[in-house]
Amino acid sequence: MTKRREQVAVHGLACADILVPKAGIDMEKWAIVACDQYTSEPEYWTRVAQTVGSAPSTLHMIYPEVYLEEENPGKRIEAINRTMAQYLDDGLFDCYPNAFFLIERKTAADKEGRWGLLACLDLDEYDYSVDSTSLIRATEGTILDRIPPRKAIRKHATLEVPHILVLINDAARSVIEPLAAKRETLRHIYDTPLMEGGGSVSAWLVDSEADRGEVFGAIETLHSALDPANPLLFAMGDGNHSLATAKSCWEDIKATLPEGERAAHPARFALVEIENIHDPALEFEPIHRTLFGLSQESFERSLAGVCTSFRKEAVRSLEEINDLIDCGDGEQRFGYSDAHGYWVYTLIGADHSIAAGSLQSVIDALLKAKTCTVDYIHGKEVTIKLGQKSGNIALILPEVSKATFFDTIVHDRALPRKTFSMGEAQEKRFYIEARKIRI
């Protein structure tokens, strides 16, 4: 990306030189779901590997987190870097310079498509600290020890392939929706089904001066309405740790560059998909927890430490859990299941304002004491299935409100980590587009 192109950034937003596989590449094998999904289901990734085989695929350019604990991660990272270099040397990509992509994602659950804008964000405008008031910021607590393993992957990578989803609070639907309304006038780049029940995704090129100008103008309008002392314009939806990794890598590179070379360096920006929180097809899902190697008695002892008292009610099914924890009566509740049944807990005098915060305090204390291990799961059914195995516990969290989301972040800062997700695992962003991040 040239210096001139970086200078057209408006409030952290910029166009990108977007790489997409050339015609003839099997896009269904190329597109792979975000690496931080299905971390307790290695069989998913085994099926994906069998489907892809040796075909060109983003599978060969990512590190599925289900494998992060393998003995020799360096071997996989070296293979990733070799693959990226090989794909570039082989001329596998078409490049669309100084552009946005309009993205439409359809899943089995969608009554209509979910719209997004593929663009670059300026990492100098991003701060993932809990008390951040930056234009681009995390919406949940960032787990700092999750950055180093991701940094090892990105440090020498020639390309980035994004699964990051970023939210804007555009009630007037002025940024993305006008492009969607005139998509028939835009150049159609791809349309592909996605494997493993992922639905389908399409993209259109947005590269005319007029269309880019309208996007930047709408962003300028959104920015002008923000509190100058706390101007939240871009809120992280999915992939915050990937963006935090990009930020950390950029800070390392920036420290080695003369001032005059920083604006033009490709590592200063990260490729993301931006979505409007007001898109009716965008679903917010709470992220649930499965605890491994813990009894209900031990869990309750720890739970007592984050509230004055609690009640528990035995129920018969996940459906009854849903009805009680999402009834909207102001009580702080969560669902519980293990091999012996289902319960709903109600906290009285909780230390935190939402159930996710209370439960995270419990989990952090248990992990610190090495009493159990935890996994964060996007689907209720999968969480229940894992939790009902002997010695495990499933914790079901209540729904997250889209209507108050931005106001909550502005006033209360970041939510407890792993509070929400934009859809379930199969609805996450798939890796498709790429961008060079090294000179």
Image (cartoon, rainbow, N blue to C red):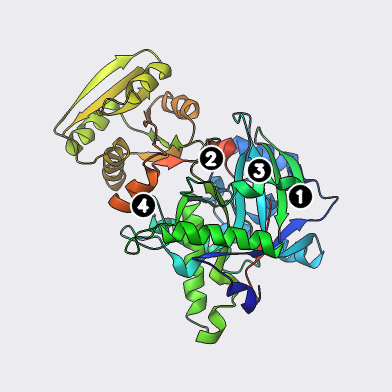
Give how far apart the Cα atoms at labels 2 and 4 are. Answer: 25 Å
Q: Nearer the viewer, mark 4 or mark 3?
A: 3
Mark 4 or 3, nearer chain start = 3
Q: Residue at x 46, y 28 (%)?
A: 380
Give how far apart the Cα atoms at labels 2 and 1 are. Answer: 22 Å
Instruction: Pick whichever, 237 or 226, lies toward us.
Output: 226
Instruction: Pick whichever, 70 or 198, lies toward us.
Output: 198
Image location (x, y in percent) of residue 194 = 70, 39
Q: Nearer the viewer, mark 2 or mark 4?
A: 2
Q: Residue at x 38, y 44 (%)?
A: 405
User: Which residue in the structure is indicated by mark 2?
Assistant: 279
Mark number, residue 38: none
Q: Is residue 140 left or right of residue 300?
A: right
Mark number, residue 141: 4
- Residue type at mark 4 is Gly
Q: Is residue 321 left or right of residue 3?
A: left
